[in-house]
Image (cartoon, rainbow, N blue to C red):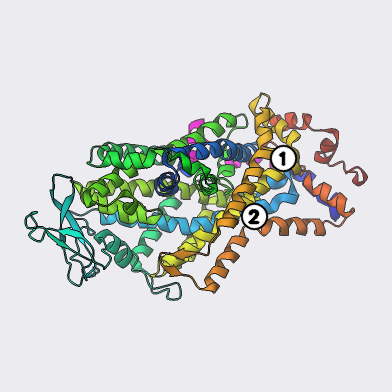
Amino acid sequence: MGILNCFSKRKDSIKNDTKDDVVERGNWSGKFEFILSCLTYAVGLGNIWRFPYLCYRNGGGAFLIPYLMFVALCSMPLFFLEVAYGQFGSLSPLAVWKMSPLCKGIGYGVVVLGTVSNIYYIVIVAWAFYFVIASFTWTLPWITCNNSWNTPQCTSRIMVNSTSNNTAEYAINNITGYNFSGNVNISLDGVGNGSTLVNTSLRRVTPSEEYWSRYVLDITDGIEDIGYVQWKLLLCLAAVWLIVFLCVIKGIKTSGKVVYFTATFPYLILTILLIRGVTLPGAADGLRYYLIPKWEKLGSFKVWGEAAQQIFFSSGVSCGALVTMASYNKFNNNIQRDAIFIPIMNAFTSLYAGFVIFSIVGFMAHQTGESIDNVVTQGPGLAFVVYPEAVANLPAAPVWSVLFFTMLLTVGVGSQFAMVQSIAASITDEFKLTNKKTLVTAILCAVKFLIGIPLVTRGGMYVLQVMDWYGFSFGVMVLAFSECIAVAWIYGIDQFSKDVQLMLGSKLFIWWKTCWRFITPGLILFIFCFIIISHVPVTYGDYTYPRWAIGVGWMLALLSILPVPIYSCYRIFTTVEGSLLQRIRFLRMPEPSWGPSLEKDRELYIGTLSPQRKRHVLGHIDLNRI
């Protein structure tokens, strides 16, 4: 029992752990599979709808200055950190903390965070899948107001004429029930003649908005009324989970091939949509709104905070997937190159998607006669309300709709199968179930599907909003900060630098060490403080959540944070030998089985260790010298 017995057991298993695991786990067939897998994971729905909105709202082109700065100071160092220790140990996010058992709670927190985000994020992917199916029709269902779900407020706007000053006139149908008090041009005969100036105080609602809220979601009045299951969305959710399972059914043997499609297809579709978008009237106005710098915005604390926060939404750090994907690399893969290239490509994709979105938004503003401020929105509203309304007025509208939502489906599925693979690998590595990975993956997908059923009820959007509001932002900051402290200060930056140097075959730049020790954790604290200061309780539109729902949200936020201190305390107080300080010092050092998987690499690693660490790895423990 205690420290000595614990090490005796570990020492006996070192040979098996280091000789056979890499064979059982496998490696990528080529270096491009890893790069494409990382791109597939990092490029997600946030690149399509969140970044363009934030860029527009926070200074246009000026927003790129803080954004790119945080890419260099946060995204790249954190990416490099995670893929470095994942590749070095050839282990998933849970088992990899053999490098410092005191910090294994980080691994548990990462698994919890990945699970929570996986459950609600894939529902958004299911919505995209539904819209793909709904687009296979001659007439898109959100074009007119002549459907059973429409209300008297529904306004179908079809451009029929244009005046000399470029003010469009519209044929507006189904206006029964309006109280008129605001100025709107209405062409009652549908050909632009005899336009009548009327007033309306009742908010006009587009067919796409009513299709989204009243038919697709059929949303209730609040989270208190969860309502019945939406069977059409439940079937879509099941289909998406099946797609994800098939992508990872054989681990990297299948996912490594799928990424050739999921990493490249979105760029093809974005390019097609961009070519079409920039040829539309009003596209130039949209792009000007998107990119023209508003330098005065850089003086706002909020702009810098949102730029930093976007890095964590888009880069995918501290969720375990990067560690898992890197664990399948060959030991000498050049991760330093990858840590620069992939975050830059992720940032480029966000910017590129903005051109697509805002060319369409500019067209929509031109078509409706509204300002871009009234057209632009963020989140699901941009993808499932604004864009469907825009494509509805394009020639061959169903074609463009299918292309857009297939792109959303592809980027969403790519992010999700990386998360599932990460959690499955965590379980199989930790419990030595490598030969049962398919079964573990199947059970994971089934369980998460069942847990996600409340999110496809009529009140499911309210549940999803709580999970998104609290389940990610707080946890990812704490875990990212903890990773930096654990590797740079507890495991030790000097030894970690030697580990990375052993893989790269060259000396590590001091820049990376400075970021890992000081700059990156300092900036993470800044972002965390920004989130706390600017935090407001969860809302959805005009709906205010009850206190109990907000309380559930905070409990959800703590799920991924609490494992970090709880596990550390557990290990300290269940290690029975030595003083408190000796136990802490002992647990901060790596287990004997930590290190490269292949024996030839492991021998080189042992040669880099200090005398104390070498005795530790070989199991020659003297408590008085710890």
Q: Say which of 395 and 181 sits in front.
A: 181
The secondary element bearing badge 1 is classed as: helix
Q: Nearer the viewer, residue 165 or 568?
A: 165
**Picture quadrant of residue 183:** bottom left
> Neighbour class for label 2 at 10 Å: few (<14), some, many (≥20)?
many
Amino acid at circle 2: Tyr
- Which of pointers 1 and 2 lies earlier in the amino acid sequence? 2
Residue 221 drawn at (x, y percent) = 39, 73
On residue 108, the disc is 2
Residue at 45 percent across and 45 percent down: it is 58
Q: Nearer the viewer, mark 1 or mark 2?
A: 1
Magenta-highlighted residues = 16-39
Query: What amino acid type is highlighted by mark number 1?
Result: Ala
Which residue is outermost to the top?
A: 506
Q: Residue at x 87, y 41 (%)?
A: 620
Q: Which residue is mark 1?
A: 488
